[in-house]
Image (cartoon, rainbow, N blue to C red):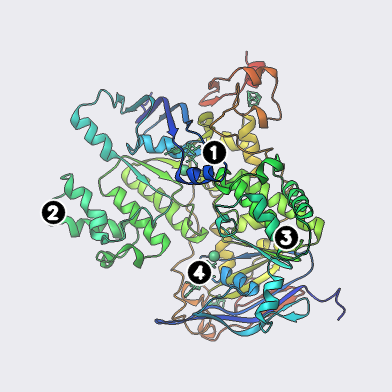
Amino acid sequence: MTAAERPLLSVERLQTHFHTRAGVVKAVDGVDLTLRRGEILGLVGESGSGKSITGFSILGLIDPPGRISGGRIGFDGRDLVTLPEAERRRLRGKDIAMIFQDPSMTLNPVLRIDTQMIEAVQAHEKISRQAALRRARDVLVAVGIPSPDERLQAYPFELSGGMRQRIAIAIAMINRPRLIIADEPTTALDVSIQGQIIHEVKALCRQTGTALIWITHDLAVVAGLADRIAVMYAGRVVETGTTAEVIRNPQHPYTQGLIASVPSRETRGHRLYQIPGMTPSLLNLPPGCAFSARCAHATETCRTAPELTETGAGRAFRCWHPVGDRR
Amino acid sequence: MTQPILELRGLTKTFVKPVSVAGHIANLFGARQKKVEVRAAAGVDLAVLPGEVVGIVGESGCGKSTVARMLAGISSRTEGDILWKGVSDRAMTADQKRDFALQVQMIFQDPFASLNPRMQVLDIIGEAPVCHGIIPASEKRAYVTALMEKVGLSGAYADRFPHQFSGGQRQRIGIARALAVKPKLIICDEAVAALDVSIQAQVLNLFMDLRDEFGLTYLFISHNLGVVEHISDRVVIMYLGRVVEIAPTEALFSDPNHPYTRLLMEQLPVLEPGARDYQPIRGELPSPLAPPPGCPFHPRCPAATARCRAEAPALRPIAADRLSACHLNDRTAV
Ligand SMILES: Nc1ncnc2c1ncn2[C@@H]1O[C@H](COP(=O)(O)OP(=O)(O)OP(=O)(O)O)[C@@H](O)[C@H]1O
Ligand SMILES: Nc1ncnc2c1ncn2[C@@H]1O[C@H](COP(=O)(O)OP(=O)(O)O)[C@@H](O)[C@H]1O
Ligand code: SF4
Ligand code: SF4
Ligand SMILES: [Mg+2]
Ligand SMILES: [Mg+2]
């Protein structure tokens, strides 16, 4: 395979486990993901399904009692799991950047925005203060921040939540990374700001060829953003495919349930569909398919964990009785 | 005509914002923070009919929670009137005041922060009804257990503490606590915002079941237009402390009148794959510290004229059951 054909990111059978007093929490337990250059992937799933831990694992941000206990994370031909920490630190913020749900994870409250942005550039590149400042200004303009010169001189608390999140995004983009992992960055913001930010991030990724993983629990948010979607449940990817395929033609019963429970114009005056039961504890998952206790189609067979079934390039699901078979 | 259960007339709240601790620190570094006035709600008028679900929508900081908190008696008002069943709260007898306070209950966004972590669910739900003489102390456990089952929690969990529940379950505890004093009106301030879609569906269904069973009225504050469209009978759109449009849900979503409402509708995330070309609302919400003169929306409005920059439009009827505050309606008016 030539470098151009090789995927930018290929996560294979990743396992990240937390060794707690109550037992081993298998937060990520066999996740597979592939991402090409410039591609946008929506990583969707309910709270606790392992989305953030997947993102943190790729960035090498797992702290004890957590540990990557298996699998590999291929990034541009290298395995991040076995990469020495010093090299990983060089990648972080340079080739791979993260945007957190809470911009205060990125922004230091007592430093001016310009100081923080210049620092972010100079940490990875020998470049003058002036040149770094110029780049900071350019990237603020690129993420749609009005009067960037004033904002550069502001402290984080002087800005609204939406503005702070945009600055965090600008900092993530400042070193022109090849991959950005965005963990629910608009969940706390309202629709109009969310719409703007999604619009801007998408345009920027297209322009610069940056690949993006957008983590969210809301399928509607990624429907208009992502090229492909991966649905996580209890530490595994249970379905993946192009956005159109996953939303129009879901194969896994969990994906189908997620789509049916979104409130909209069509659901007005009706009860919403509820996925029965509750998220299982990761400490004692049922044997076999983790969704079986909530699944209307579960059979004896489902007591054995379903393997990933591939039905086409980049289209796969983990279920013994996919929706298509039941038609 | 049915008498509104709740009416707001010119409800206004002005905060005098002293320099914050962070501001003081920043001042040491050369920032220039001063004491300022914020008009969080500016003359809000609204009438709510019994049994209605009224959605309130608007960008962060537009004053939704401020209005809710004045209604729930959590915060004082600067000006204006609140009428409960036709009686202004300034003219209420002591009994009427107590009734009003109990009959309007609020459910908050963060189901964890709003529950006392050191209290058992039994007391979280049961304390207020005993204290207000709604039930005798001896019946507390039976009453709480019944309420818990009503909201889909096992009564066996009554002795547990909040941290032993999931987010969706904690939200149900908050709902049971609100129901315990037999309210007529429930204010939900972003009550499902923190929940996953699957749990959100459970809680929204529960709200509708309880409405049918107890004849409840809801004020439903949310920035999620999909949720508001699903649940509301009527929708109120707020912008910078003002109401800019009120309309029945279907009319509003199919034929929005105010330019701001129209732009909001375009932002609605929908479950439709494929590139949606956002025409993002230009610019940021202006600071409520320095609201623009004239129509507060004019700096971002694609249809703004000279008149909009000088004169604030009033909220006026534009059709049956519909109100909007925009000068454009003058041109089409008879
Ligand atoms: N205690 C306070 N002191 C000073 N200003 C305040 C206070 N509470 C609210 N404000 C200001 O009043 C305005 C309206 O706030 P409010 O909390 O009602 O907004 P909201 O519409 O509920 O927003 P969100 O969607 O973010 O919850 C904001 O500009 C806010 O900063
Ligand atoms: N430090 C930790 N110790 C133990 N368990 C953890 C830790 N961090 C996360 N987990 C568990 O890992 C699972 C996945 O978490 P996360 O990836 O944050 O979920 P989400 O999909 O909501 O982002 C959850 O069950 C969570 O409780
Ligand atoms: S494998 Fe069986 S239990 Fe699991 S989702 Fe498919 S049908 Fe349901
Ligand atoms: S009054 Fe003028 S500025 Fe305000 S919304 Fe109407 S057209 Fe736009
Ligand atoms: Mg997370
Ligand atoms: Mg609020």
Q: Tell me the chain of label 4.
A: A
Q: Tell me the chain of label 1.
A: B
Q: Quadrant of the C terminus of chain B?
A: top right
Which one is in front, B101 or A193?
A: A193
Which one is in front, A191 or B134?
A: A191
On screen, residue A4 above or below B301: below
Query: Same chain for marks 4 and 3?
Result: yes
Q: Is mark 4 within 8 Å of ligand 2?
A: yes
On screen, residue B292 above or below A170: above
Give the Cα distance between marks 3 and 1.
Answer: 37 Å
Residue at label 4? Answer: A48
Residue at label 1? Answer: B58
Query: Same chain for marks 1 and 4?
Result: no
Q: Amino acid at mark 3?
A: Val
Element carrying mark 4: loop
Q: Position of residue A313 (x, y in %)?
A: 77, 74
Query: Same chain for marks 2 and 4?
Result: no
Q: Position of residue A323 (x, y in %)?
A: 62, 71
Q: Amino acid at mark 1?
A: Gly
Query: Same chain for marks 2 and 1?
Result: yes
Residue at label 2? Answer: B137
User: Between tags 2 and 1, which lies in front?
Assistant: 1
- Is residue B69 visible in the rendered structure shown here? yes
**Residue in the picture at 67% in, 40% down:** A150
Give the Cα distance between marks 2 and 4.
Answer: 39 Å
Q: Is mark 1 within 8 Å of ligand 1?
A: yes
